[in-house]
Amino acid sequence: MSRKRLHRQGYDPDILPPQIKMYIDDIEKLLGDLNSKNERLFHISISIRSYAKSKKDLKLRAEMLKRICQKNNCALFPYDYRQEQTLVSTLPLCYNEIPVSREMHTSGIAIFMPFTTKELFQDGQAAYYGVNTLSGNMIRANRSRLKNPNGLILGTPGSGKSFSVKRDILDCFLTTADDIIVCDPEGKYFPLVSALKGQRIRIASNSEQHVNPMDIAIDNYLFENPMEVIADKSDFLISLCEIVVGGRYGLSSEERSVIDKCVQRIYKEFIENSPDTAKMPLLSDLQYELKKEGEVALRVSNSLEMFVNGSQNLFNHHTNIDMQNRLICFDIKDLGSQLKKVGMLIVQDTVWNRVSENRNRKKITRYYIDEFHLLLKEEQAVKYSSEIWKRFRKWGGIPTGITQNVKDLLQSKEVENIFDNSDFVYMLNQASGDRDILAEKLHISKEQMEYVTNSGPGEGLIRYDKVLLPFTDHFPTNTQMYKLMTTKLTESA
């Protein structure tokens, strides 16, 4: 209309000032958005609250804010003599006393709202997992609320895995009543466990503490399904013999059948005679039964000789430790590489017995397995670990595997099931090949993967069910708690 009026008055529209042309184009675009894109027009006021220790500092800060706004084509002016009204307007009271406003449409206002930021903050018995890198808000989560609370903690050496695990253990110890069991192949958790009055169990050739791999939960046998208890124990002992025998092909199907038959015979006789923990069967009993089977079990019984009568007979004793402590750490640092695999598997079976007992008490058991990749090199041990990941949830167990490379979790379909059955994944700095695997398996975008690319200690991504967000966990270094949890020799207690 204005152009027609000017044309009737003899003015050429082409000689209009550029600013007027620009404003007309902007108004026409705004009207088009309001009519066709379901946009709305809002009156908004933007206020910035700033503090300083003196008027001079406040003036300098105001000038700095002005320059920042000018760089972004915005005008900023101080609201002098009405500071009280401005303060009230900046508080989350939905009350505005600033009469200055401007019109903006829906898309323009959306840039002030953090729609792309997810949060994870649960009340109750929730553990602390750092702060949200984007919003600065705390991340608190209770894994027991997940449909599948199994977890993995992944990261390169020096990325802060052990520190994160210790901080998680400490939080769970202080905020929940859950039992906590740690399998420690490197002897890194003793200072924290000792400070919390936990039970350290040192498994070594020269140790006087013993764990009997033939133990079963007698209460479960007597009052639950005895066949299920024996089946679980048979599965474990087959896995144990698989590691002991070794070789390229492991146990044959005939050897597995013989072991299963001997195990059933041993425990049937044990229950019929005297179901007493002091008379629990030993590995020597299993070897004796295997020798009675003749040639088909000769290889297995000979392989057990070193663990029954030889130099490594530390597992041929009755359990002589107090397993009722709420926090237990199995220290297997002093075991050799081959024995370490045996030790970790025996620890897992001991944990399974504890989980079985706690299920009757309706108590949750948290199990942390450090250097998890050591158990992923033997096929039978992998199958046993996979069963834990599948069944622990029903029994009130929350297992957590700690390892360096996610490639270790994709060696076979059985190991991949461990990864797929973990709704909690705590990712610190990742190696190049591992980043590609995680991006594909967890559907992580290229931008999100930047948080685990050359990231510092205590920085990365956390996946909690369908929530994926970056975290930062910079723990104060001047505290006694930090000295108990750090793995740096120069900073440890």
Image (cartoon, rainbow, N blue to C red):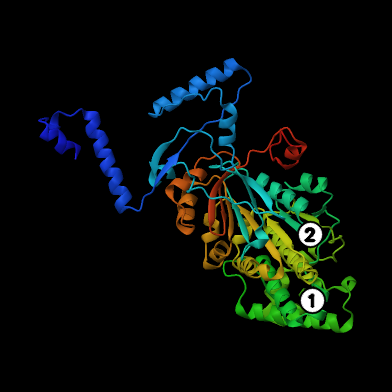
Placement of 31 over or under 76, stated as above or below: below
Residue 431: % across, % down? 50, 46
- Return the disc, 1 or 2, that comes first in the chain's sequence: 1
Q: Secondary structure at mark 2?
A: loop
Q: Nearer the viewer, residue 383 or 456?
A: 456
Q: Residues within 10 Å of mark 2 (few under 14, many from 20)?
A: few
Name which residue lies at 56% across and 36% down: 89
In the image, residue 385 sits, relative to residue 232, either above or below, namely above
Across and down, in percent, residue 406 comes to: 54, 54
Q: Quickly name the residue at label 1.
A: 220
Instruction: Give the image location of residue 38, x and y in percent.
Output: 35, 53
Q: Quadrant of residue 105?
A: top left
Q: Is residue 203 visible?
A: no
For the residues marked 1 and 2, what is the alpha-carbon distance in whole angstroms? 34 Å
Q: Is residue 356 left or right of residue 82?
A: right
Find residue 311 and name its label.
2
Residue density around tag 1, few if under 14, some if 14–19, many if 20 or more, within 10 Å = some
Query: What amino acid type should be assigned to the residue bearing mark 1?
Result: Asn
Res. 141 in view: yes
Three-letter code for the amino acid on which mark 2 is drawn: Ser
Which residue is located at x 75 percent, y 35 percent?
479
